[in-house]
Image: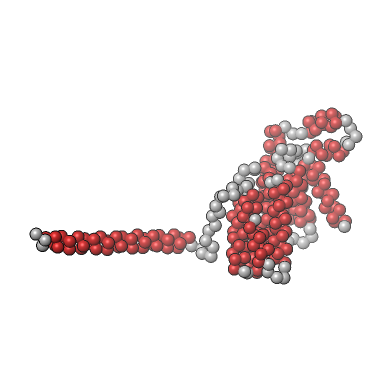
Amino acid sequence: MKIIGQKWTLLFLLVLIFMPEARTVAANPEKDSVIADEHNVDATLNVQQRSERLKQFEQIAERLYQDMQQGNTQGASNNMNELINVLEGLSFKGLTSVEGIHALAETIMDAKETIASVELEPEDWAIKSARLRLAVNSLIHKEKALWLQYYKLMANDLQVMNKARAEGSPSEFKKGFQSMQSHYEVIRPAAAIRREPSNMNQFDSWMSYLAGLTRNSTWDENAVKGAMVHGDRLIKELFGRKSDEPVFLPISGYNSPWYWTLLIGAWIVIALIYTGYRKYRAYQNVSSLADKGDRENSYRY
């Protein structure tokens, strides 16, 4: 209980750091609103200063990501302190919603707890640092954010699950879901920063329902089929894709794309040769019939 209490306390403090307006109201609940507004104006950075601070925030987050990926405990600890310090007085108004700020604060909190842990777990460090990096990148870069590159990965996971459902293979379906779940856990904070809470809640509910299906002792074909009907639409909505946009997925299981290029080219050449041969035979038949007709006509008169 003590650890949970400290966790939520840190989260609350981070939210206050992210939102100077909320911090002012919390610190001065009984003061006149006009005085609070004047204080906010003085505390808020101008546009240029905020832009520079956000750039610095992203640079520190990138260094933190590199340190955590490499298991550099001292560097990660130093960069985490810098990351929190640079947030002081920085307003995120207009960049994301309250839910987005909460998601970002939670990724910082999780990364901080991971760094402070006694044992270094490389996989956990890699995941937490990736979540934080994608979240910061999503906050600062509205267009072409890094987390959007996960679309094809999750679309491929969906394809694996659909294939497993069609073949009636619960084990393969579960593998596809677990892969999608791991990808979603990494990008969820970044997605929450840019997507409406209703979209996030809908996708969370869908994932939760699929998780329940994979835990069932019996394979419910109708339930799985019904759940998968919504998968394509939900993934496209999550990544901001058009509903009628085709998904290109590479052929899996082969490491040499040149092999398939040459094979397809060979089939095209064979088809053209065969078509030419058929036309040649048809022309020969027509010519022979025409010659025969001319000979018969020459004996009529």
Instruction: Name the side, left or right, on which 292 lies relative to 97.
Output: left
Instruction: Name the side, left or right, on which 247 lies relative to 195.
Output: left
Judge whether 41 appears above or below 189 on screen. Answer: above
Q: Extreme right residue here?
A: 30
Numbered circles on residues, count: 0
Instruction: Name the side, left or right, on which 93 lies relative to 233.
Output: right
Among the 4 quarters of the image, the one containing residue 216:
bottom right
Q: In this rendering, does residue 247 appear at all?
A: yes
- Give the residue at x 51% y 63%: 255
Quadrant that contains the C terminus: bottom left
- Give the residue at x 73% y 63%: 212
- Give the residue at x 33% y 63%: 274
Quadrant that contains the N terminus: bottom right
Among the 4 quarters of the image, the one containing residue 126:
bottom right
Q: Extreme bottom residue here?
A: 217
Among the 4 quarters of the image, the one containing residue 49:
top right
Q: How is the image coloured?
A: secondary structure
Judging depth in this view, the residue of 58 and 160 nearest the camera is: 160
Judge whether 266 appears above or below 101 on screen. Answer: below
Which x, y percent locates residue 239? Answer: 63, 49
- Give the residue at x 66% y 57%: 183
Q: Extreme front residue here?
A: 301
Judging depth in this view, the residue of 131 and 98 nearest the camera is: 98
Which x, y percent locates residue 189? Answer: 71, 50
Q: In this rendering, does residue 68 appear at all?
A: no
Which x, y percent locates residue 35? Answer: 85, 29
Judging depth in this view, the residue of 264 and 280 nearest the camera is: 280
Which x, y percent locates residue 235? Answer: 64, 53
